[in-house]
Amino acid sequence: MSLTGKNRPGVETGLFYRNALMLGKKTKQLAEEFDDRVIAVLFRDCDGTRSEPARLWQDKVNSIRQGFRDAGLGRCGVAMVPKPKSEAWMLCVLRDNYQQCARLENLSGNDDSPDSAKAQLKAAL
């Protein structure tokens, strides 16, 4: 049994941990079945808002990494967590030609915001 605590994910990040744990176990199973090396990549949007704690993104990344470790993957698991969401990464490619993309991490993760990442991506497309 795994309970929330100092070294365990909280309510906000528990889903990320469980996803990584399940993916990690399945990845290990496939590695053994095919006698080959593996890597697991868990892609989840952070979907944070400005009102949430600044550490939320890091907590989610850490939860994914811990899930992979607990599954026995070690460093063969990748936490891929766009901030605030994947639309920011797509904007970086489509509109900004991979230039100064870090500023896009400050976009609103709220789709109802008038200048949301989703709205900007729609305009870029």
Image (cartoon, rainbow, N blue to C red):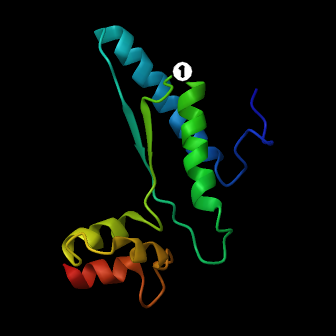
Q: Nearer the viewer, residue 50 or 14?
A: 50
Residue shown at the point (76%, 26%) measured from the top left: 1
Indicate the position of residue 59 as horizontal and vertical percent values: 63, 52
Q: Nearer the viewer, residue 37 or 109?
A: 37
Residue where numbered disc 1 is placed: 72
Relative to 40, 124 lies left or right: left
Residue shown at the point (73%, 39%) measured from the top left: 8
Please tell me whether residue 112 is drawn above or below residue 39 in the rendered image.
below
Relative to 31, 11 lies left or right: right
Residue shown at the point (57%, 59%) measured from the top left: 57
Residue shown at the point (34%, 72%) measured from the top left: 101
Q: Quadrant of residue 71?
A: top right
Q: Give SS at disc 1.
A: loop
Please tell me whether residue 69 is drawn above or below residue 60 in the rendered image.
above
Please tell me whether residue 16 is drawn above or below residue 18 in the rendered image.
below
The amino acid sitting under disc 1 is Gly
Mark 1, other Cα within 10 Å: few <14 / some 14–19 / many ≥20: some
